[in-house]
Structure formats: structure tokens, C-alpha cells
Amino acid sequence: MRASRWVLGGIVALAGLAASCNRPNEKGELEVNDTPTSGKLTISVDETFQPIMKAETDTFQELYQYAKITSSYKPEQDAVEDLLANRSRVIVLSRELTADERATLNKDKIVPEVVRVGTDGLAIILHPSNPDTLLTMDQLRDIFTGKTTRWDQISGKKTLSDINVVFDANRSSTTRFVQDSITRGAALTSKIYASKSNPALIDYVASHPNAIGVIGANWISDRDDKTVENFLDKIRVAAIAPKASANPDDYLQPYQAYLALKTYPLRRNLYVISRDARTGLGKGLVAFVAGSKGQLIILKSGLVPAIGQTRIVNTAAQ
């Protein structure tokens, strides 16, 4: 009888411990009680990386059945604010933290762990009827700043008129990337439509012949995914060149090989960032994505893993 009481007492204690995992404290911050492969974890993900991170977290939870990960997909800056406010212990971005963001964490004696786990690209997508599928970086700059407002200014063809520029959302990483890497700080045109999500962006471009959209390549890179096949049936992916060329082969799409060779001009990194100081589920997820299994998922998705080798096969005639 005494032994059974001890067993029962242990079960009750464990149940109480499990119920307390990730319970908010008086400040509304999450209190954690987990291991690298068990417990509960809330993460915030730049929504342009939703497909790849859903694959990562789904696989992690299949392998570790006592781990529960709640993913919130949102604009880049919203994800950063979640990390700073301790609403999420792990975030996924296309950039590292700024000095000011690090300083905010340092005030709470937190040194963030920042791990680069892969390389992604931005895809420029068009309506299937658009004949202007070869674009240069200068042409993109003129389009996104509003200097070029009509498609006939690109090729002289009169099939399309006013250009409709569409992004996924306000405060998104794609908007920031375009300003940093394409317009080089110049203001974006005021004639921009925010579609609120990446699938909605694809649908908008598919239904508006004059539209040009910017989307994370991982939404259209996994050719084994039926959802990706459906997306690609709706739109065309433009080929981009650093400068004008008479050779169509100099214009590239965001294929894995061109990302790996660094020849596609609209490349960006993929970072997993944790604020956890302890060895809990946050560090466990970071280690998984950066490890062999997580990197294989990135490779199979059509992106470039940070570790290992991407095999490039030259199929040109000898």
C-alpha cells in the first residue's frame, strides 16, 4: 500500500509539472519547463518561409512525440517583436538581428543564438500571358520605384499596359529585401498592393495580367509538392539577370543550382534565432534544423542547406 501511494504521488507531481509548462508569469511572459525533445514551444516564423518551416516542425514532432510546437506565421518585423517581448522563444528570419535588437535582449542578459541554416531566393512572378519574362535588376529597380509604370516601356510590346506591383504584406521581409537589394534605399512606388498572404499573392498575380509579384522561392521550389504544382500552373516565374544581355541563358530563375552557385541575383539567407539560455525545446529545434535531418529537408525542398554539399550536374552537350 505504501509503495502504491508513492507511485500515485509521483504521477500527481508529474501531472502538475506538465500543467505548469509554458504558463505565463505575472508579466505575461512564458515560463518554460521542457527538454530538447519534449515540452511546449511557441515560435514565430517569417511567413515567406512557411512551407519549409512547416516541413521542419512537422518532422520534428513526428520524431519526438512529446514535443508540441505552435508556429505563428507573420510579417518579419512582427516575428522580431515577438522574440524581443518573449512571446516567442524562437523565430525564423531572412536576416540577422540588428544592433538595436541585440541590445534590447542584452538588457535582459540574453545573448541570442543565431544560426544560418540555408539559402533561399526571391522569385519574381508574372501572369502567364505576360511576354516580358526576362528582366534585369535595373528594370526591376525602375518598376519598384515607379520610374517604369507600363509594360510597354520594358519591351515595347503593346499587349499589356499599367504595371501592378504586389507584395505579400506590410512589414514583410520581401518588401525590406526589395528596398535593400533592388531599389538600394530608394522609396517604393506608392502604387503597391499588399495581398496579406503568399497564396493570396499568387492568386492575385494569376488573375491580373498586368501584375508583378515578389514571393519567397520556397513557396514554389518543391516540385514534388502538389500545392507547388498548382501554384506554378497559375503563374510564370521571371528569369533575372544582373545586367542586360543578348543571351537568354544569362537570365536565371531561382533554381537550387543557381542559388548554390550564387549566380541568381535575388538570394537571401535563412536564419533560426533563439533567445533560450537553457538547453530546452528551443535549442532542440535549432539543433534539429541545423543538423543532418533538418538540412536534408531543406535540400529536398529545393533550397540550399547551410551544411553539406549540393550536387551540381552539368547536362550541357560535351
Image (cartoon, rainbow, N blue to C red):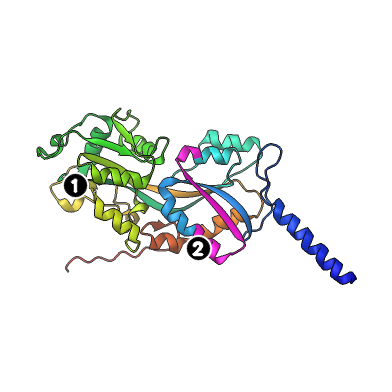
From the viewer's perspective, is 176 left or right of 126? right
Tell me the kind of residue under disc 2. Answer: Thr
From the viewer's perspective, is 44 left or right of 269? right
Closer to the chain start, of discs 2 and 1, is: 2
Secondary structure of residue under mark 1: loop
At 46% across and 61% down in the image, what residue appears? 295
At 62% across and 62% down in the image, what residue appears? 66
Q: Which mark is residue 59?
A: 2
Highlighted range, magenta:
57-78
Could one spot residue 93 in this view of the protein? no
Image quadrant occupied by the C terminus? bottom left
Tell me the kind of residue under disc 1. Answer: Thr
Q: Is residue 137 above or below residue 286?
A: above
Rendered location of residue 310, percent (x, y): 37, 63
Q: Residues within 10 Å of mark 1 (few under 14, many from 20)?
A: some
Please tell me whether residue 193 belongs to the stretch shown in magenta: no
Residue corresponding to mark 1:
133
